[in-house]
């Protein structure tokens, strides 16, 4: 009888032990953080919505992707979707031992190959921005002109510069390869020279040093239809406000829709809070 009671107690303790294991992190520093995300977009006056976005999370970190497609006959729509899906799929296999910069390089080149496999070169492409948040640090990568910024203390600070001709001209001037006059002539040229979905795809722009995020920071991702169609101060004030994250995203897009521009591009925003 005593032996039977002892076995019952042992089984009971074993059940409690395995139940407790379910609530323990897999390893130290890999606790699942909770993030608040706001996402919204508008088609503007275009016929097709060519922007796409997506987020995913694991114990290894959090990933957000925003892609702005371009092309004819739905080429832009297809390209942006391929880019977002590719990065999300590759993040599912991401491990803490993998360098974030290496992850971005592999993912962007895989997305580029995926678009070229689906569409002939020139039929489609996409600007892509991605952020990876891991252990309270922000890593980012960009190909094209998706803008990535952080709002801290009410100030919206851009992190990425992008791959447009005007930015390239500034870099070339600083390197000494073109004159000041030549650089100034190109300041109004916003054409893309690098994006995913082309045979000549170049290196991505990525973080030099990860940003250590603070508790009340907000990571902001924007397509060019948003930051070129809306005053930066309007975005800054909306993000710094007291509303919930998703409502902030809605308010920003409503401001784009309410603008007085006759021709409006697709515009998208992704907000991430909670660090």
Image: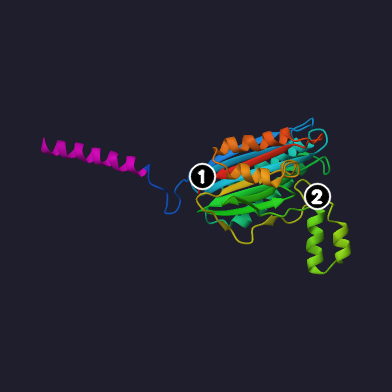
Callouts 1 and 2 close, C-beta under 8 Å: no
What stretch of residues is rendered in magenta? 1-21
Q: Quadrant of residue 206?
A: bottom right
Nearest the camera: 9 or 167?
A: 167
Secondary structure, mark 2, is: loop
Query: Percent position (x, y) of residue 234?
Result: 67, 43
Query: Percent position (x, y) of residue 73?
Result: 82, 33
Nearest the camera: 158 or 90?
A: 158
Q: Is residue 5 magenta?
A: yes
Q: Residues within 10 Å of mark 1 (few under 14, many from 20)?
A: some
- Residue 88 visible in the displayed image: no
Q: Is residue 155 left or right of residue 127?
A: left
Q: Is residue 65 magenta?
A: no
Q: Quadrant of residue 65?
A: top right
Secondary structure, mark 1, is: strand
Q: Earlier in the sequence, mark 1 or mark 2?
A: 1
Q: Residue at x 80, y 50 (%)?
A: 192
Q: Residue 58's mark? A: 1
Q: Assign the magenta stretch its main secondary structure.
A: helix
Residue at the left extreme? 1
Of labels 1 and 2, the one closer to you: 2
Q: Provide the residue designation for mark 2.
A: 192
Query: Percent position (x, y) of residue 245?
Result: 56, 39
Above or below residue 259? Residue 178 is below
- Residue 29 visible in the displayed image: yes
Q: Residue 272's mark? A: none
Q: Residues within 10 Å of mark 2 (few under 14, many from 20)?
A: some
Query: Percent position (x, y) of residue 190?
Result: 82, 50
Residue at the bottom extreme? 176
| Quarter that holds the N terminus | top left
């Amino acid at each position: 009888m005593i032996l039977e009671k002892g076995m019952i107690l042992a089984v009971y303790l074993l059940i409690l032990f395995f139940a407790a294991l379910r609530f323990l992190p897999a390893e130290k520093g890999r606790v699942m953080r909770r993030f608040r995300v706001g996402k919204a977009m508008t088609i503007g006056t275009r016929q097709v919505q060519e922007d796409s976005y997506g987020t995913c999370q694991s114990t290894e970190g959090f990933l957000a992707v925003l892609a702005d497609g371009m092309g004819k006959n739905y080429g832009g729509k297809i390209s942006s979707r391929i880019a977002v899906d590719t990065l999300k799929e590759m993040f599912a296999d991401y491990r803490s031992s993998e360098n974030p910069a290496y992850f971005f390089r592999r993912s962007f080149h895989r997305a580029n190959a995926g678009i070229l496999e689906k569409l002939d070169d020139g039929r489609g492409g996409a600007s892509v921005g991605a952020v990876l948040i891991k252990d309270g640090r922000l890593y980012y990568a960009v190909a094209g002109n998706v803008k990535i910024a952080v709002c801290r203390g009410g100030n919206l600070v851009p992190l990425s510069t992008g791959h447009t001709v005007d930015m390239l001209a500034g870099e070339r001037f600083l390197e000494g390869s073109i004159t000041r006059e030549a650089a100034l002539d190109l300041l109004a040229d916003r054409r893309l020279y690098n994006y995913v979905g082309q045979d000549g795809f170049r290196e991505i722009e990525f973080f030099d040093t990860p940003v250590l995020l603070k508790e009340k920071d907000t990571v902001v991702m924007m397509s060019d239809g948003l930051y070129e169609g809306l005053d930066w101060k309007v975005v800054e004030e909306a993000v710094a406000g007291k509303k919930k994250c998703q409502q902030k995203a809605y308010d920003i897009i409503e401001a784009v829709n309410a603008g007085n521009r006759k021709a409006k591009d697709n515009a998208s925003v992704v907000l991430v809070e909670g660090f």
